[in-house]
Image (cartoon, rainbow, N blue to C red):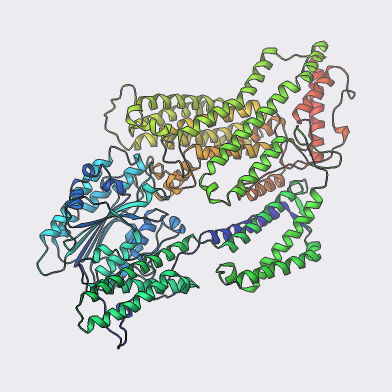
Amino acid sequence: MKVRSSVFASFILMLEVLGVALFLRGFFPVPVKSSLSSKNKLSDLPPEPLTGGSSNTSGAPKPLFKRVVVMLVDALREDFVFGPNGPMFLPYTRHVIERGSSLSFVAKARPPTVTMPRIKALTTGSIPGFIDVVMNLNSPALSEDNLIWQAKTAGKKIIFYGDDTWVRLFPKHFMEYDGTTSFFVSDYTEVDNNVTRHLDSTLKRDDWDILILHYLGLDHIGHISGPHSSLIQPKLLEMDDILKKIHGSLVSKEADGSLPYLLVLCGDHGMSETGSHGGSSEPEINTPLVLISPIFKRKAEMEKPGVVEQVDLTPTLALGLGLPISQNSVGHVIPGVLEESSLREQLRFLHLNGHQLSCLLKDSTPEYQKEAGFEQFRVAEKAHGSWMKLYLEGNTSEVLTNMGKKVLKQYLEALAAMSSALSKQLGKYDMYSMIAGMVFVFQLLLVLLLAMPEALSGSASVDLPVLSSLLSLPFYLLCLFLASVHVLVCTSAESSCYFCSLSWGLVFAAVAFSSAMFCILISLARRRLPDGSQFHGKSPQSSSGGEWMLSELDVLLLAGTVGHTLSLAASSFVEEEHQTWYFLLNTLCLTVFQDVCRKYFREQRDEEEQIVLSKKSQTFSHSGSEMCSEKWLALATPPFTLLCCRLLRSLNQTGVQWAHLPDVGHWLNSSEHKVILSLLSAFCLVLIYLLVQRRCSWVSKVALAFGLVGVYSYRAAVGNVLFPWQHSSRTTSKGTVEARFVYVFVLGILFSGTKDLLRSQIITTDSKLKSRGLWEIYSGLVLLVSLLFRAHNLPVLCCCLLIQTLMAQFIWKKLHYDAAQTTIMHYWFGQAFFYFQGNSNNIATVDISVGFVGLESYVEAPAVFLTALSTYAGPLLWACHLVCYLSSERDRFGMPLHVCDVQAHIHLLLSFAWLQGFVIHPPECQCKSSMWPTAQSHTGPAAIYTKQMSLNRAGCHPGRYLGVGVICDVWECILNTTQARATAAVNNTYG
């Protein structure tokens, strides 16, 4: 069955999306949630257990606190409070911790450590999934059971000031609120003043029960300049003064005989050493939790803070306010809060928490009875019933007290075990769905690879053996085998997967599809990969039998890309993926160096013979000095690339295991080395101009020069670098004017490039104008990236442009690498430069502060665009350079491209790049010997020149000119035309 290449590629791409979605469905399990749609109510609370008597119908225990104030400081790290700098950063808070009536803990936040998921964790007690990272940008209303809803339902009056994420999550829940946007990270002053300005009037009032304050300034400072910035201490002192004011107000209003207050100081997450968050490093997940209330014992000295889970705060606050615990809460009550309550009340609190966790365990775990925590809770509940019987009988002996303490210990152990079992469910992968998704994707990728030569042919169609596969015996045997495997997996005792929950109709369709794809794959393999494939040191050619012949470079590109794709199945390789790309890039440079040595040394004798013949005929001669310099520059390019890559590796530490280690970037950003950073930035900007301006129009050259001056001015305005006349203690600004100055020149360069590109397509067919237009668009992108990059990252951009220039001039052109090889090399370099920037697969390395360069307020569209552009600048610059390079090479040789070829190439490239692994080989065709010029075809100097020119330009092998789907008859037309033109030109020149 013949299918057009574009339709085939689109079909493959859509099916790959489904396969990847199935894999992700198994890799990211659904968060633990109760199957009940209703929320917990006070009337649903279980009675106290009682052995040998009628059921005790006592309701909820009395609340422990009358008022609760939650002061949440965004990105508050635990070392800011409990570390050695704590007395300097938060003096009053440390005094209360050391000498006051307080409890202090290190609360561990589960990743993703992003604001919205952490707010959900604090209010619902559940552990959100990574999908909540996407929802963080536009948080919908929270529908599941949560502490805020419970408090509102119970008649509690709630006031909120701070991050407007709370307002979006809990609409119509607050009696009074004032939300501030959390995304404009350039503002770290007004965003907190908008919260504090309500504080004095609110503290004087008595018409509220819960006050929630969410301060964002510290988080914004971290995004801008990191946790070691000079702005950190003033901001923490400001937070300390606010806590002192709140505490003083609560103490002054405390009345005898009334319930005490509770003041909570906490953070939603911490911040990494670079000031970001979202990952799982210790500085990101360790947050302080300080509970201040007169109900707690006064301390005599500083005690080491205990360790709790952040979700433990939810049941603690719920029980402290006399509210039901949220259905989906996986936390357990903090025991220290209950110490001053009676033993009966403590047991009652723990029993309510245990009942809620056991119900959630039943709903989410099929084999819940086998869980140790569930059995421990049942034992503790029975012992609690026996204790209650003795207590109600009036027994006051010491035996009853010891028995009650034993039951209390059993409850705590059961709660910890059940909480741990529920939390670990997020780490259980759905292996069946993951394997099924991987099988689908790899089948599709292999079919795409084998069908690619035919898809890129002149007919732009693929002949798929669908009917023969569906009627073959292996197809039906595979269907029976896969159906048996599905039944076996889904009926196993411990299976619980998404794929098993699908209807049998969908499952049968998936089984039939997988079986058919396997049969098609075997048929294509037999057709495309005959026996006897050979490997040669030169570039791949077509042998007489139509067999594929791969060079060492082809083998490296194929094995490296496929090997990297397979490595993504291991979490350790994903965490340290940069190491894989560094290794592949170094190996690529060594392989290219081998090809250069082969060209300039092993083939030197042939070149000398050609030069001798040229001199004898007195037609032309190459300059000896020019050839020598070209040779040594080509030989120096791979080692120079290796040197640049090694230096860039030291610039930014990335990954997970060693991201905390110091690097050159930290050294450059320290205040002591600002002069060195300024000189380095200026040098890099000058070099960027020299590398980019060479192919631009004079208007774009002027705009590029002014734009780069504006980039340095912006960095000086924000305090990263210095002008020679500028004092280091000068107050910094947001640099809005300077950034907008650069934006004007970026738009001007992009407009100039777009104008030239449109003129080349509509008004004239000038290929040089088209190449210049593409390059100017690329130059505008470079200017924009130089503005967004931090000052210490400008060497990354500089090395990127330098390597692109050297590789294009002395490697890709001189060694006649085709478009397939060049495309994959660009892809490898782009991935490596993604990590050279300091990025990783950890969301904490995303620098969101660049989204507000030149903005006075938060505007979602440009903020998202600038953040994405800065994050993926490396791959994007290499992809754009690939387009410019292939376009210039095509225009240089005058090779036409058909629309169907371009469309098929784009579709296939997108499809094969889906799993970050693609290998594109051009169609290998057997061309007639008559199409190749020979020395016997012509006599005299024209014959020698024509042969040398034709073979050099064609790369000495047909079917590899640019690797974009050109078939043999197009080849023949091009080469014959080239031969005729060259012969005529030489004969005219030399008479």
Q: Please report the residue visible at 68 percent of the width from the left and 26 percent of the height from the top.
A: 596
**457 in relation to 710, above or below:** below
The quadrant holding residue 632 is top right
Q: Please state, as top left, top right, bottom left or bottom right, where the C terminus lies in the image.
A: top right
Residue 795 horizontal side relative to residue 395, left or right: right
Q: Is residue 448 visible?
A: yes
Camera-side residue: 338 or 540?
338
Q: Is residue 64 left or right of residue 117?
A: left
Residue 235 screen position, x and y as percent: 25, 44
Q: Considering the image in quadrants, where does the N terminus appear?
A: bottom right
Q: Position of residue 821 (x, y in %)?
A: 68, 37
Residue farthest along the bottom direction in this orientation? 54
Q: Nearer the viewer, residue 280 or 865?
A: 280
Q: How many discs mark residues in the rendered view?
A: 0
Residue appearing at x 40%, y 24% in the figure: 679
Q: Is residue 145 left or right of residue 31?
A: left
Image location (x, y in percent) of residue 703: 47, 29
> Residue 78, position in %: x, y?
30, 49
Where residue 978 sits, quadrant-wise, is top right
Q: Residue at (84%, 30%) from the top-left corner?
A: 932
618 to the left or right of 407: right
Front position in the image: 192 or 943: 192
Q: Nearer the viewer, residue 427 or 982?
A: 427
Q: Say if residue 770 shows up in the picture.
A: no
